[in-house]
Image: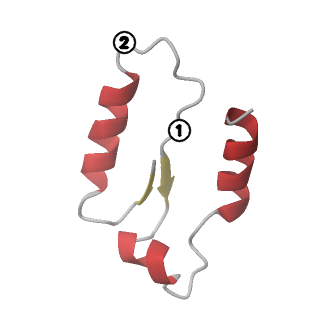
Amino acid sequence: MIHGEKAHSCYFSKDAFANMIKDNPCVENKELMIIPDIVHTDLYDGGGKNAIPFDKITAFFHENLK
């Protein structure tokens, strides 16, 4: 899950992630990425900040989609 830190709906991803891993025996292939100083719209259009962590997303997929 990826969310901008300053997005109004950031709480939703935090809550959803907490519920996803609660009592889940397979948490090692799940991650919540909170992107500092970014609202969620910056993740869509870049907001001039190159906010989308493509390298980290790619590494996550390579590690967990074997």
What crowding class fits label 1: few (fewer than 14 Cα within 10 Å), some (14-19), or many (20 or more)? few
Against 39, residue 45 (above or below) is below
Residue 19 at x, y = what percent?
30, 28
> Quadrant location of residue 65?
top right
Against 21, residue 36 (above or below) is below
What crowding class fits label 2: few (fewer than 14 Cα within 10 Å), some (14-19), or many (20 or more)? few
Q: Quadrant of the C terminus?
A: top right
- Disc nearer the start of the sequence (1/2): 2
- Residue type, label 1: Glu
- Residue type, label 2: Asp
Residue 29 at x, y = what percent?
59, 29
* Secondary element type, mark 1: loop
Q: Residue at x 55, y 88 (%)?
A: 48
Q: Which residue is mark 1?
A: 31
Which numbered circle lies on residue 57? none
Q: Which residue is mark 2?
A: 23
Q: Is residue 26 left or right of residue 14?
A: right
Residue 46 at x, y = what percent?
53, 82
* Secondary element type, mark 2: loop
> Quadrant location of residue 64?
top right
